[in-house]
Image (cartoon, rainbow, N blue to C red):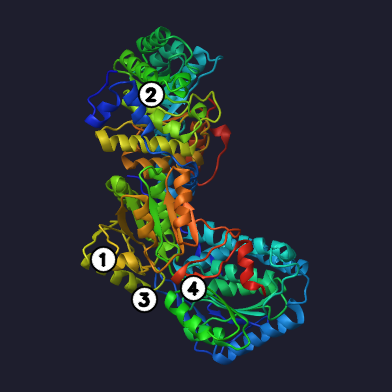
Amino acid sequence: MWEYAPAPESRDIANLKPNYRMFVDGKFVEGSGEPLKTINPATEEVLAEVSTASESDVDTAVKAARRAYDRVWSKMPGSERAKYIYRIARQIQERGRELAVLESLDNGKPIKESRDVDIPTAASHFFYHAGWADKLGYAGYGPDPKPLGVAGQVIPWNFPLLMAAWKIAPALACGNTVVLKPAETTPLTALVLADIIQQCDLPPGVVNIIPGAGDVGAALVGHEDVDKVAFTGSTDVGKVIQGQLAGTSKKLTLELGGKAANIVFDDAPLDQAVEGIVNGIFFNQGHVCCAGSRLLVQESIADELVEKLHARVSTLRVGDPLDKNTDVGAINSREQLTKIKELTESGEAEGATRWTSECPLPDKGFFFAPTVFSGVSQAMRIAREEIFGPVLSVLTFRTPEEAVAKANNTPYGLSAGVWTEKGSRILWMAQRMRAGVVWSNTFNRFDPTAPFGGYQESGFGREGGRTGLEAYLDV
Amino acid sequence: MAAPTTLPSALADAVRDESSLRRFLHGLPGVDQVGVEQRAAGLGTRSIKKASKLHAIDLAISMVDLTTLEGADTHGKVRSLAAKARRPDPDRPDVPKVAAVCVYPDMVKTAADDLVGTGINVASVATAFPSGRSTMDIKLADTRFAVEQGAAEVDMVIDRGAFLSGRYGQVFEEIVKIKEACGDAHLKVILETGELVTYDNVRRASWLALLAGGDFIKTSTGKVQPAATLPVTHVMLQAVRDWKEQTGELRGVKPAGGIRTTKDAIKYLVAVHEVAGPEWLDPNLFRFGASTLLNDLLMQRRTQLDGHYSGPDYVTVD
């Protein structure tokens, strides 16, 4: 037997500090909220203490953003804003290894993903949007579209730095200033981004980063001087925010949960479909709002495909997120692990057939072995609720119409995958999918040029591409 | 068409006649180019260090078909290649010997004489290598000559012209006949994937060769660019894996041409390990067709053991 020796990335590269402070008006300052301790979900050790914002700190941050907007950023020519944004992009690349290791420590995702996906894609969002800053007149929103003002942004823990980039880059490119709240379990890379922003000499107050829990987020989105709210996170919180903002003039975009269907027809390239299914649900431990958590497979190939899938999933290496050969890392928090366990138990109780990889799991930390449920029906909770973990539900269909009906039979509508060698069927399906993104013969591919967003309870508004600029322009 | 071995009924049907064979090959699932290349690149990022690297290097050495296929080959060159095969690193007797020495038919006897009793096989290319452009009689005579001279392994080329024009039956028959002519010698079937171009073709040719009784499927002659690539090898590894699923038989894969560094070789071994499965990590089931690869493996082996790099002057050039 050939065992791969451990190949851990050095954690020293993360340049981890014992204390992190919030970033307001161009300076790192103590917040007056209760400090939080952020832990490494792979070991449960405390990584650092992070100061959090109180309501008055939120007010200070929004005021700083307003000042920066009125005095500097909204008046600056786009070509000048672009220089700052390009500088941020280059600095993210420069400090890519540091950010990747820190992200894996704080979030639990495997280093190969933070290194090859999160950090490079974060940089590319800044690069892409920097290019728009002086070309907004050609974006299709009139000759000289204006920014909105101060953007209050709240982001989740699944892609901490990447989500910060998705939010900050278009806001800055369009001429807005930002107050951003990272998730309470993963604040560290956003604060290193703050350091980068400081070193890039961005005018004070243009970007403010205030860690904290849900109450800080609520104070931020509810602040009267915020003009635009962007939230990525759970559908429950999204609904609360929408309610809170009803009747105000604030512009809102929400990017919420999903229960995406990955649809495999009998003429699909099977080996690559298996890869796509694995990537669709086990990428980032399944902590992906657009994860392909429902596999819809044509009945005639279901047994063969599921057998191939089990064999492939058995080869996934689960363990130390810093090991370069780890495929599936740690679940982000005990709370999330409990939720995943609860939902998988419901799957068994409701009569689905559970298969779980026999891979060894570490003794410490929050880990969950990749799991595939077959014999799932639409009525089961595991087919309807977002699990947000490495758990796949397999359903079957016979006709394309049935595939469409089942795929769309969800309150969500963020993404979908279609696997077939027949081009006409891809187009036919894509027209009928109620999902913001439809991937064909691939899954979970992200690019700053492509708009991303949802239908129904997956939210509204688009991020990325020309379309994504609309959310940050007064149009 | 005569099936060479007892096949399960589904596969026996596939080789009943030419149209069944065509239906079978065209009924295989397609290969998505972007997907297979993405997977190959992804697996290529595996980080193999320390003991696992040393193990991989020794394994790779034992899988090398040390090859010389030049018009300018001499008996002297083949003899020194045989010496290198027996003791790849003369200073380090614990280095494993290579799997085989691969030469043209007229050099087989020279190599075989020098390798008697070593456990190292002589492999010979045959069937009008590398183009395969000759008559069946000549291809058969070429094969018989190589085996008579002492080749324990025969590397044949398929008729790519026939394959690409859809005459699958002809390609099948040729492989079956060459396999017969091989007798006890193992048959490696060279698909020349650089001329088949698409991954769908590689998959079909792989299955065609397996159905016809090839013991190994081999990517390339080394005379056509591109030669072996990782994604092509993935597709071929999937074929032998699926073949085992259906028949219980283990068949081998041999990428050849263009694999020059230890780093590359380890990427192939990772693919063998994770695409086909650990049981293919065996010189009887996986080979590297290479000439310069061996010395890089030896240099990296020294680096692993000595803790520093020594350089090309410390390994023998032939």
Q: CA distance from mark 3 to mark 1?
A: 19 Å
Mark 2 nearby-residue class (10 Å; few <14, some 14–19, many ≥20) = many
Q: CA distance from mark 4 to mark 2?
A: 54 Å
Residue located beneath label 1 in the image = A347
Quarter of the picture holding the N terminus of chain B: top left
Lateral position of residue B146 relative to residue B74, left or right: left
Corner quadrant of residue A368: bottom left
The kind of residue tagged 1 is Gly
Element assignment for label 3: helix
The answer to whether marks 4 and 1 mark residues whose Cβ atoms lie closer than 8 Å is no
Q: Nearer the viewer, mark 4 or mark 1?
A: 1
Residues at marks 4 and 3, CA–CA distance in whole angstroms: 14 Å
Q: Dot 1 lies on which element?
A: helix
Q: Position of residue A64 (x, y in %)?
A: 67, 85
User: Which kind of residue does numbered mark 4 sit on?
Assistant: Pro
Residue under label 4: A156
Image-based side of B236 in relation to B183, left or right: right
Mark 3–mark 2 Cα distance, whole angstroms, equals 56 Å
Three-letter residue code for mark 3: Glu
Give the numbered dot on residue A335.
3
The alpha-carbon separation of the residues under discs 4 and 1 comes to 26 Å
Dot in front, 3 or 2: 3
Q: Nearer the viewer, residue A355 or A248?
A: A248
- Nearer mark to the viewer, of 4 and 2: 4
Label 1: few (<14), some (14–19) or many (≥20) C-alpha neighbours in 10 Å: many
Which chain letter goes with mark 2? B
Disc number lying in front (3 or 1): 1
Disc 2 residue type? Answer: Lys
